[in-house]
Image (cartoon, helix red, strand yellow):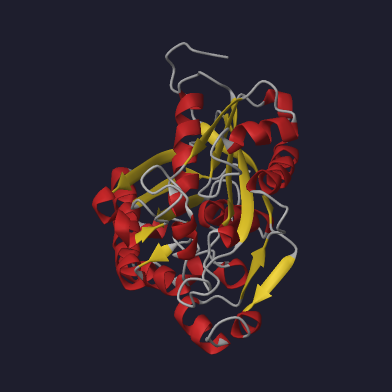
């Protein structure tokens, strides 16, 4: 551990991801609710999504993604000083899921915490870990986005059940000389709009009861059109603000990795910031919206597909319930 008041540059040195084996296609959904493949795809860009086993919790998916990320970074679990798990679907209310992951991967020297910022959770977790390493308080962090959205999706609600899938991704962070790494992160929230995207029951405001189960209040409720509008505005503004802060333009960015919620949202952001669609890495067609896992799963795939390489500038943008949103600009060093 180092703490000499020197601000260190922090880089992502390894990534990994995990997607469950079961594939749920639009054709499958046609048999479950009143919808069609054409309706789903034209409005969302989604063809299929992955669904975790009933006995497969968030910590299990996080474990698989973490093992791949640590191997990719050539880091032992006992070298990890901090684990952050971003999730909307923790294994249980107590303890935090990060502690469960710590035990599963053998990261005995790490302290652990969860971050709850819905689909923007990975960006929030990334900045928490970035700050700890930059300040010298720890040397190595593991940041995980893992969500089992299938367990909070109302499979009778055709407007929301077509959107979500399950998965996990992980990133290993360390200080690195000779690269700017995570150059800047911008985060924002607006709690006055919380009712537009929420799970009404299960917390201290409305505890679980026979009535809340009958009312299906433990599932996601979303005002789709309003969420769409605010998602585009917030992510567009965050992307532009972070570029302005860094004295850059969108033409300086090699790859944009957005939250994979909806292809139409991504296209609208591209139009607003004058970024060609080919600048974006998009995998929403295969996985749907995996919430906190979305950005890091796409980042891992972009790295594997050689869409991003050492020295590239990568812009991450995300938006989720809260409302919470953010953007991060990274010089890739893998």
x, y percent for residue 163: 51, 70
Name the foreground residue: 69 vs 312.
69
x, y percent for residue 293: 56, 53
**Left-right relation of 62 to 158:** right
Q: Is residue 325 above or below residue 80?
A: below
x, y percent for residue 201: 42, 53
Residue 319's image quarter? bottom left
Residue 247 in view, yes or no: no
Q: Report the residue at 51% width, 77% height from top.
A: 45
x, y percent for residue 90: 56, 44
Q: Report the residue at 43% width, 22% height from top.
A: 7
Q: Report the residue at 31% width, 58% height from top.
A: 195
Name the foreground residue: 323 vs 310.
323
Q: Is residue 81 above or below residue 265?
A: above
Residue 327 in view, yes or no: yes
Residue 14's image quarter? top right
Q: Is residue 183 above or below residue 320?
A: above
| Quadrant of the snapshot with the N terminus | top right
| Quadrant of the snapshot with the C terminus | top right
Residue at the front extreme, as displayed:
210
């Amino acid at each position: 551990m180092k703490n000499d008041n020197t601000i260190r540059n922090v880089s992502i040195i390894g990534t990994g991801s995990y997607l469950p084996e079961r594939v749920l296609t639009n054709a499958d959904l046609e048999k479950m609710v009143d919808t069609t493949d054409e309706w789903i795809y034209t409005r969302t860009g989604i063809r299929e999504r992955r669904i975790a086993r009933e006995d497969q919790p968030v910590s299990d998916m996080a474990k698989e993604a973490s093992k791949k990320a640590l191997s990719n970074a050539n880091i032992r679990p006992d070298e990890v000083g901090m684990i952050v798990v971003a999730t909307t679907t923790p294994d249980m209310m107590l303890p935090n899921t990060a502690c469960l992951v710590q035990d599963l991967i053998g990261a005995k020297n790490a302290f652990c915490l969860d971050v709850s910022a819905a689909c923007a959770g990975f960006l929030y977790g990334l900045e928490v870990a970035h700050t700890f390493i930059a300040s010298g308080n720890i040397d190595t962090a593991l940041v995980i986005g893992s969500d089992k959205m299938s367990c909070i999706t109302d499979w009778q609600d055709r407007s929301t059940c077509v959107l979500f899938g399950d998965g996990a991704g992980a990133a290993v962070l360390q200080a690195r000389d000779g690269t700017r790494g995570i150059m800047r992160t911008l985060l924002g929230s607006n709690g006055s709009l919380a009712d537009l995207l929420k799970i009404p029951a299960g917390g201290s405001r409305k505890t679980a009861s026979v009535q809340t189960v009958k009312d299906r209040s433990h599932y996601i409720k979303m005002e789709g059109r309003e969420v769409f509008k605010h998602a585009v505005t917030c992510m567009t503004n965050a992307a532009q603000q972070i570029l302005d802060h860094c004295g850059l333009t969108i033409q300086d960015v090699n790859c944009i990795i957005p939250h994979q919620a909806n292809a139409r949202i991504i296209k609208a952001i591209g139009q607003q910031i004058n970024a060609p669609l080919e600048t974006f890495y998009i995998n929403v067609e295969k996985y749907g919206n995996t919430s906190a896992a979305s950005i890091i799963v796409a980042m891992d795939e972009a790295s594997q597909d050689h869409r991003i390489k050492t020295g590239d500038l990568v812009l991450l943008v995300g938006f989720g319930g809260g409302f919470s949103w953010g953007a991060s600009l990274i010089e890739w060093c893998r």
